[in-house]
Image (cartoon, coloured by chain):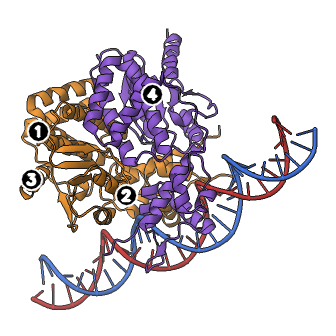
Chain colours: A orange, B purple, C blue, D red
Amino acid sequence: MVNTGFNIAAVERDTGLSKDVLRVWERRYGFPAPARDDHGERIYPAEQVERLRLVKRLMDAGHRPGKLLATPTEELNALAPRRPQPPQAVAGASAGEELDDLISLIKRHDGGSYQQAMQQRLARQGLVRFVQDTVAPLTRLVGTAWEEGRIEVFEEHLFTELTMRLLRQAIASLPGGKRSPRIILTSVPDELHGLGLLMAEALFALEGAECIPLGTQMPLLEIASAAGAHRADIVTLSFSVAFPQRQIPGLLQQLRTLLSADVELWAGGGGVRRLPEVAGVKLLASLEQSLDALAAWRGKHT
Amino acid sequence: MVNTGFNIAAVERDTGLSKDVLRVWERRYGFPAPARDDHGERIYPAEQVERLRLVKRLMDAGHRPGKLLATPTEELNALAPRRPQPPQAVAGASAGEELDDLISLIKRHDGGSYQQAMQQRLARQGLVRFVQDTVAPLTRLVGTAWEEGRIEVFEEHLFTELTMRLLRQAIASLPGGKRSPRIILTSVPDELHGLGLLMAEALFALEGAECIPLGTQMPLLEIASAAGAHRADIVTLSFSVAFPQRQIPGLLQQLRTLLSADVELWAGGGGVRRLPEVAGVKLLASLEQSLDALAAWRGKHT
DNA sequence: ACGAAGCAAATGTCCAGGACAAATTTGCGA
DNA sequence: TCGCAAATTTGTCCTGGACATTTGCTTCGT
């Protein structure tokens, strides 16, 4: 068997830790401690990759790598999130429980029932409340479950995929024709979470905006071109909590300089919630604020 | 203005060229030739990033970097694809023209009309023929247009996004309940094209398979977990032509060893078309072959 | 006792330049 | 013209050093 272990590129792909980080951790903390092949290149056994992914998850939850890498694997599994959790304001105990039920469908890998249940909620609540009272809190719940290790990546992917389908379907059934303002929705490279964008799109579309969904991961220069070509009034980006916070202000500033001045730049998602202001960029800390921003734009443009 | 230029990480993000490549090109070919900031770190002006993206595109089309980087920018724009284009077998001239019309809607940035036109085709052709005779050839056309620089990235994104919506919608309206075999559909990290997966899913779902769509970019270890948790019979991966070919065989072998032996591993998409065989992996060179593979599986399992 | 300011440790990212294997092209002989 | 071997091209990996920035801790002033 040739294939016993991951090379450094594979580990980077699978963990999201850069080659530089993998090497410097090894140098400083003695972990990971990959074997070497004939050419002296690192070969990471699967268990180490597993542990690295656990470490990454705990880091996203607020832990420091120095501590984590000095801790034996067994203890790591027991660690709780460190970043203070903002108290989950759910619309009542029963609502919270219902959402938990939805999650347990996912955890039971019963996609069919999940879709059905969500479809029902959509029909019952209407799109606006469905987005605000079901999808958004559900996404947050999944996020915290992920931080606490109560949910697997593939379960989260299934959740995302099925939920996005529902939203897209709902959006598609909206009447077209209205057209102001023209809003481009997308995300920057390395930011692949599109659920937040879709929630925003649903709300914007309901308010009669013309949404231009470009999917995720658009290079900055392309976003600028797209804004020109589509004669967009607003460019909306989404950043998840997982996106490296420190890069966001620079990215936004850079895109701001690339965009024509009469195009507004909005940024939303969990990643911008605890962010300082950026000149020329409107930060949307919540879905409600998105709607406020839209109303404000309308006010400004008669 | 602080923000005049991209640092090396930003260029990597926006061009898809690794830091190593950017540095070694500079060393060997003298391009790119970024400025340096106070700390001696590279600052790439926007034009150089632009040119790098052009070079990248031409490389994907079969050119060699050594030549490209020695060529002045103006000439680059005139370069044609080098990789021999397999003759586009379309089902007749009129069909080809119709598809061109669809593309020109995208190029006119008229998403609404595009959706409408596609919806009509879907209704007229039915899902199977829609996938095989419309979506698949259209995707190929967009691919070649991209290679030849006749289409912008953001136009391609819009095309993908709108087309995926249509397919998902069509899939959602299929009757549920049937359930064999259980097929996981996903892609590996760094492979973010999901359109091929969706085409496969549409065909598989129509044939009565239970499809478990996990979206794109699943770490290998997670794919293995998901296969176990969902009791999958088959794992299907998709690789686009853009995915670094050389990595694919290793990836597949690695995943093969991670998967239980009674789970089949299929790989499809443009990236596997000119690939040597991999032990224990079924390579699907076309959508038709996917259906054949499914029939074969059914044959084997009574 | 408590908050602010300053210092020290921790951490990620960048750099240079060397090495080498895999892929591709070139050159040569049949 | 075809096939094979040598030469070149190209991407990726390596080491080890440097440094800016963030985080944590300590001390000082109120």
Q: Are marks 4 and 2 in contact (CB under 8 Å)?
A: no
> How far is disc 1 from disc 3 in space, using C-alphas?
19 Å
The earlier-in-sequence mark between 1 and 3 is 1
Determine which residue is flagged by label 4: B96
Q: Amino acid at mark 3?
A: Arg
> How far is disc 3 from disc 4 in space, using C-alphas?
43 Å
Q: Amino acid at mark 2?
A: Leu
Which-is-in-front pick, marks 3 and 4? 4
Q: Secondary structure at mark 3?
A: helix
* Disc marking residue A298: 3
Determine which residue is flagged by label 2: A221
> How far is disc 1 from disc 2 in space, using C-alphas?
33 Å
Determine which residue is flagged by label 1: A128
Q: Is residue B208 above or below residue B241?
A: above
Which-is-in-front pick, marks 1 and 2? 2
Q: Are marks 1 and 3 in contact (CB under 8 Å)?
A: no
> How far is disc 1 from disc 4 in space, using C-alphas?
41 Å
Which-is-in-front pick, marks 4 and 2? 4
Q: Chain of mark 2?
A: A
Q: Amino acid at mark 4?
A: Gly
Q: Secondary structure at mark 1?
A: helix
Quick one: label 2, few (<14), some, or many (20+) residues within 10 Å? Answer: some
